[in-house]
Image (spheres, rainbow, N blue to C red):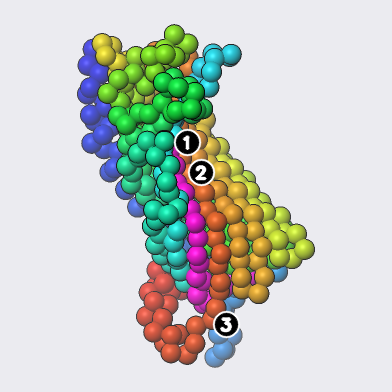
Amino acid sequence: MMFCTPVALLQRNILLFIVVCLTATLPTIAQSSKTSPVKGNIITTGAAAAVLPDHDSTYYHSFDHYITTRFYFSQKYAGLELERPIGVSKFRYVPNTSLTMGVGVTYQSISLNLGYGFGFLNNDGIKGKTRYLDLQSHIYGRAWTIDMLGQFYSGYYLTPKGLAASSPDAYYIRPDLKIRLFGVSAYHLLNADRFSYRAAHLQNEKQLRSAGSILIGAETYYGIVKADSSLVPSALSENYGQKGVRRLDFIKLGPGIGYAYTLVIQKNFFLTGSLCASATLDYSYQQGAKEKAEKFDVNKDFIYRIVAGYDKNNWNVNLALVGNQLTVTSATTKDKYLLSSGNFRLTLAHRFAPGHKLSNRLRPLDDMIRNVRGR
């Protein structure tokens, strides 16, 4: 039986598949501002015309024509955990990523953030060295949210400290371990009139009253986990069914549903939580030193967002976590692989109205955004 052919075929077509998904989704997002004849359209009476708001302004206020600037600290990650029998020691591979300091700006639906991991913020050589490129894009439209991942990680350490290591005060280092993860998810907010994701994550809107929304969408992922030797350290191999596996390839695709809610406390404090769960059809292919195996299965995955903050007088300070957890079936044992990725961020943001000269310079950008929205 040929095992390489399906994997090679998936590798050649996964990027094309993601592009097709985005192509099908983005036009819908661009048209979301034209969802009803009452909200977001021009109503003409005789010679006069007025633009009605595209949301319920008693629930959240939009600062679309303000400029939102931010200063932030963030840290991204992509980890791996192996399921094990009850009573067996838990371990997790974690990257030694940098704490990044950066600045950003948002105007209407366009955001730009630039950050760098300065040396004085990062000095933890005991955990080994991780080389990584982590491309995470979280797009918060008025009625849609899209997450895109492109993660390339090389070099991990094992937690907890001392497990499988040469001494209790050292970490087991795996410079040969690599994780590659690509994915895209798109979810539609059914109550976008009253609930704002942008208020928590972009700071260019403010949630005035508590509200929530059901989300409906879909997700797809493709990933590779590989190392020069077994993913399970030899000192732990007797307790793990995944022993001997050196490489894991997988692809996931399926629908999802979720719920998001913002609790507003005393007008200015807010707590936003969101959880989306998907049921994905999975194909996994794993390879050891001598054997290869593949399997189809159905698994559950999660995307979660938690933001807590304070918003008053055009100032916003918040602490946010955006992440996901993927479950991948092992082809040779009932114990599965758990992959997690995400981003922690502490943000201080300020909104201000542009002056006359700056407004004129922004007018071409306004026209471009208006054309994309079809308004």
Residue tagged 3: 50
Marks 1 and 3, the one that precedes in the sequence: 3
Whichever of callouts 1 and 2 sits on the residue coming sooner in the sequence is 2
The residue mark sitting in front, 1 or 3, is 1
Circle number at residue 323: 2
Q: Nearer the viewer, residue 119 or 205?
A: 119
Q: Is residue 21 left or right of residue 12?
A: right
Give, as a three-letter code, the residue at label 3: Ala
Check whether the beta carbons of the residues at disc 1 and disc 2 lie within 8 A of each other: yes
User: Mark on residue 340?
Assistant: 1
Considering the numbered disc 1 on the image, is that residue within a helix, a strand or a loop? strand
Above or below 228: residue 25: below
Q: Is residue 130 left or right of residue 370?
A: left
Residue at left offset 34%, top offset 18%:
230
Residue segment shown in magenta: 60-79
Q: Quadrant of the N terminus?
A: top left
Q: Please report the residue visible at 64 percent of the width from the left and 59 percent of the height from the top.
A: 309
**Residue 197 - label:** none
Q: Residues within 10 Å of mark 1 (few under 14, many from 20)?
A: some
User: Residue 120's x, y, as percent?
Assistant: 42, 54
Residue 322 within the segment the image draws in magenta: no
- Determine which quarter of the picture holds residue 209: bottom right
On the image, the x and y values in percent for residue 57 come to 66, 70
75 falls in the magenta region: yes
Residue depth check, mark 2 versus mark 3: number of the one nearer the observer: 2
Q: Position of residue 193 (x, y in %)?
A: 62, 62
Residue 64: % across, % down: 53, 73
Question: Quick one: which residue is furthest to the top in this view?
Answer: 238
Q: Amino acid at mark 1?
A: Ser
